[in-house]
Each structure stands twice: as C-alpha cells, then as structure tokens.
Image: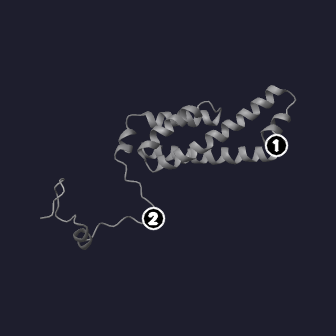
C-alpha cells in the first residue's frame, strides 16, 4: 500500500497544480468572475461557469497540501486527504476518479499502520542544542529533581 499512497500524493499534487493553473488562466483571460459570467448568453450558464471556477480554485490548494504531506506520511494528512477526496468526487470526471482512488487507498485497513509508524517530519532551521553542563550549573538546574523550590540557609 505504500506505493499506492505515494502515487495518490503525486496525483493530488499534479491535479492541484493543473487546477490552479487552468483556473488562474481562465480568470485572467476572461477578465475575472464578472467577465466570465458576462461572456455567456444566459445568466444561469455564466453563474455555473463562475461557480465551477471558484470550486476548482478552492479544491486546488487542499489537493496540493494533502498530496505533499501524504507523500511524507504525516498523520494528519491522511484524514485531511480523505475529506479532500470526498469533496473531489463531485469534480467530474477527473476529480471523481481521483477522489474514488483516494478514498479506496486511504480507507483500506492496511494503510493506517503506514501513518502510525511514519518517520518524524524534518524541521527546517537549526535545532536547539541541549544545555551544557556549565549552563545547567549556572542556572541551578543541575542535579535538582525536586518540584519544591529550595530555600537558602
């Protein structure tokens, strides 16, 4: 199932990038939502085109985020991508296929242990160093295990 999870993450990233690029290109070429809506002869078609464009913009970013972090096997990303896949089922035809595949991969019982034993996510930037013996002695934290503060004699 590891291969399916990595493939699902990659497909979600690709789908998110394509949806984002096409939606932004349509907005720019159509002159914004008002321009797209006015390009149609009837108001209902213009409204549906505008709603479709907003939906694609709204689903693109979660697909990107979920795809990236599912590939890294982050615990929260599994649940996040289950929700994104369920919404993506409404996005016919390619989103429906991706959503069904995503739900199948992420809801199979064999997938859950992959996310339970995931390697820790690497942090960017410097990791704080442990206190040195001299620093511990200077602030009085060396050898003190009591929770009651000591009183001076």
* Mark 1, secondary structure of its residue: helix
Task: Tell which of 33 and 45 is nearer to you.
Answer: 33
Location of residue 141 with respect to 98 vertically, above or below? below
Q: Which residue is mark 1?
A: 30
Sequence-earlier tag: 1 or 2: 1
| Number of other residues with Cα within 10 Å of mark 2, as a class: few under 14, some 14 to 19, many 20 or more | few
Whole-number angstrom distance, CA of label 1 to CA of label 2 = 42 Å
Please identify the quadrant where the C terminus is shown.
bottom left
Name the spot of residue 78 as percent of width and height, x first: 45, 40
Q: Is residue 1 left or right of residue 35?
A: left
Residue at 64% across, 33% down: 91
Q: Is residue 95 left or right of residue 8?
A: right
Q: Which residue is mark 2?
A: 125
Residue at 72% across, 33% down: 51
Task: Tell which of 101 and 83 is nearer to you.
Answer: 83
Q: Is residue 152 left or right of residue 115?
A: left
Marks 1 and 2 in Cβ contact (< 8 Å) = no
Number of marks in the image?
2
Numbered circle sitting on residue 99: none
User: On the image, which quarter does residue 34 sit in?
Assistant: top right
Residue at 40% across, 39% down: 111
Name the spot of residue 16 as percent of width and height, x first: 61, 45
| Number of other residues with Cα within 10 Å of mark 1, as a class: few under 14, some 14 to 19, many 20 or more | some
């Amino acid at each position: 199932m590891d291969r399916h999870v990595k493939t699902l993450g990659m497909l979600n990233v690709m789908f998110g990038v394509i949806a984002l690029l096409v939606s932004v290109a349509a907005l720019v070429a159509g002159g914004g939502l008002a321009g797209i809506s006015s390009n149609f002869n009837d108001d209902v078609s213009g409204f549906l085109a505008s709603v479709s464009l907003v939906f694609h913009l709204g689903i693109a970013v979660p697909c990107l985020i979920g795809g990236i972090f599912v590939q890294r096997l982050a615990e929260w990303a599994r649940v996040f991508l289950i929700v994104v896949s369920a919404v993506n089922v409404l996005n016919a035809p390619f989103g429906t296929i991706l959503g069904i595949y995503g739900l199948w991969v992420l809801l199979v019982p064999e997938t859950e242990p992959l996310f339970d034993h995931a390697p820790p996510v690497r942090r960017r930037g410097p990791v704080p160093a442990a206190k040195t013996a001299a620093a511990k002695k200077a602030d009085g934290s060396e050898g003190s295990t009591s929770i009651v503060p000591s009183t001076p004699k």
